[in-house]
Image: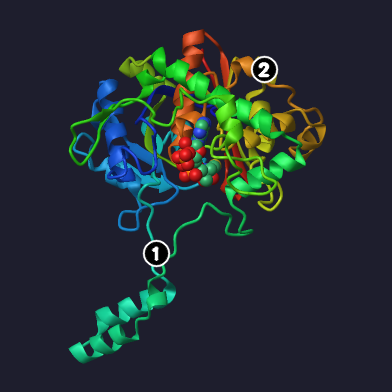
Amino acid sequence: MPSLGTPGRRVAIVAGVRTPFARAGTAFKDMTAIELGKRCVAELIQRTNLDGDLVEAIVYGTVVPSVVAPNIAREISLMPMLPRGCEAYTVGRACASANQAITDAADQIVLGHHDVVIAGGAESLSSVPILHSRTMSEKLVTFSRAKSPAQQLRVLSSVRPKDFVPITPAIAEPSTGETMGQSADKMAKINHIPRDEQDHFALRSHRMAAIGTDDGRLAAEIVPVYVPPKYSTVLTTDNGIRRDTSIEQMRALKPAFDKKYGTVTAGNSSPLTDGASAVLLMSEERAQILGYPPLAFIRSYAYAALDPGEQLLMGPVLAAPVALARAGLTLRDMDLIEMHEAFAAQVLCNLLGFESRQWAERAGFNEPLGEVDRSILNVMGGSIAIGHPFGATGGRILTTLANELARRGGTFGLMTVCAAGGMGHAMVIERA
Ligand SMILES: CC(C)(COP(=O)(O)OP(=O)(O)OC[C@H]1O[C@@H](n2cnc3c(N)ncnc32)[C@H](O)[C@@H]1OP(=O)(O)O)[C@@H](O)C(=O)NCCC(=O)NCCS
């Protein structure tokens, strides 16, 4: 299978940054996704000492876009340090939206359309749009078109209390009505993943993230953000990492979704989060000319999908073998693996899927990928502890994977992300 850029141009990952990830309703509750994205992209340009005029495109992901400014990428590209001619567009692929932005940007570079692109994503789950009911929307439109006070009064007098009941976006599949949490519970049951195993995995996420923060590896990837409205405090690290949690505390938590038989809790799920990420991508040639040593190169990627009513979050199990085959590599060649942790149950199910012949055959292969060496998996924790701003997570994971691979002197890294709609993403990066 052809890998990305073979025999064409290679895509260099030059640098990546992100905001701290903050639990929804906390530090960033007064910031929009656009503001978070701008802060992140501005810092990426400053940290890399990049001449903004060189940026040809911004590709950005978000899952719950602003109703008034849906093309978040364009709003970001209109920052003063970027040229007006920097084209920009926004992509959506649920929790893999930043990944979609990154692979779109990479494709543009491989095609030779661009040489310098910033890709990433942002999400504010503190400020999701709340919609009026259809009846209320119609009444509001009729009111705005009314030609006389009498007509206006007639519309107003038709408004009933139930018209005010809002429609809030749910983290549920439109096709099945099942929430992500319910899907994770279902997957845990099908694959016999005990609660204790999930809690231990979640605890590990917090422990590893705390270590990665304290020793500066994660902190180095984070843009400090002054917190509005007073701007008198600054957030420099993720505020969802629980240093004080223990297996006893995790065990005491009640199931969050299937209240009676479920094993998925607030402790072993990723929390609702606000944040942004951005990655600077260049053609290998341009990076060399400009004197930027690449952190790594994108070797291959893949997307896959399965029926959302089946095992919603198994997409990575179908995407990873394809990405590895396109890279001409195996799981054993990987020096580091980063898996998005939507839920501990999902990661543990995905890991079992990697070992399963049945899942391998579904992905079109005879042999399973094999067992993941846990010592190279999510070595600085993952979304359970760090948080998961849907549209931003892919940029965080790629940045961490590339930085840590470079630090360890490794050669190959694999990342996977599961996403709503039964979709999955996998990417292989390489150094050298
Ligand atoms: C699981 C979920 C419903 C929990 O929401 P929540 O109840 O608001 O979560 P909280 O953070 O308030 O946690 C609930 C309680 O558990 C406690 N808790 C959570 N994690 C804990 C931990 N690791 N250790 C100890 N206590 C913990 C909290 O302190 C809180 O206790 P309190 O009620 O005494 O304050 C929510 O995070 C969610 O929907 N997550 C999944 C998001 C999703 O679907 N993402 C898509 C994935 S791709």
Please say whether residue 371 is visible from this viewpoint: yes
- Seen from the viewer's position, the closer of residues 97 and 82 is 97
Residue with the most extreme bottom position: 150
Q: Is residue 176 above or below residue 202?
A: below
Q: Residue at x 31, y 82 (%)?
A: 142
Q: What amino acid is at disc 1?
A: Leu
Q: Are marks 2 and 1 in contact (CB under 8 Å)?
A: no
User: Along the horizontal axis of the image, is 48 left or right of 345?
Assistant: left
Q: Position of residue 311 (x, y in %)?
A: 69, 45
In screen coordinates, is 409 left or right of 354?
left
> Quick one: quadrant of the N terminus?
top right
Where is residue 97 shown, x and y percent of the image? 48, 42
Q: In front here: 18 or 155? A: 155
Residue 318 lies, in percent from the top left, at: 69, 37
Give the SS element for disc 1: loop
The residue that label 2 is drawn on is: 373
Residue behind label 2 places its C-beta within 8 angstroms of ligand 1: no
Residue 301 visible (yes or no): no
**The residue under label 2 is which amino acid type?**
Asp
Dot 2 or dot 1, earlier in sequence? 1
Residue at the spot 68% in from the left edge and 47% down from the top edge? 306
Reading the image, the residue beneath label 1 is 131
| Closer-to-camera residue (193/411) | 193
Q: Is residue 179 left or right of residue 370?
A: left
Q: Residues within 10 Å of mark 1 (few under 14, many from 20)?
A: some
Using the rendered view, name the quadrant where residue 362 is placed.
top right
Q: As rendered, which of 33 and 150 lies closer to the eye?
A: 150
**On screen, residue 134 above or below 119:** below
Q: Give me the residue at 36% from left, 18% from top.
A: 220
Q: Position of residue 325 (x, y in %)?
A: 68, 27
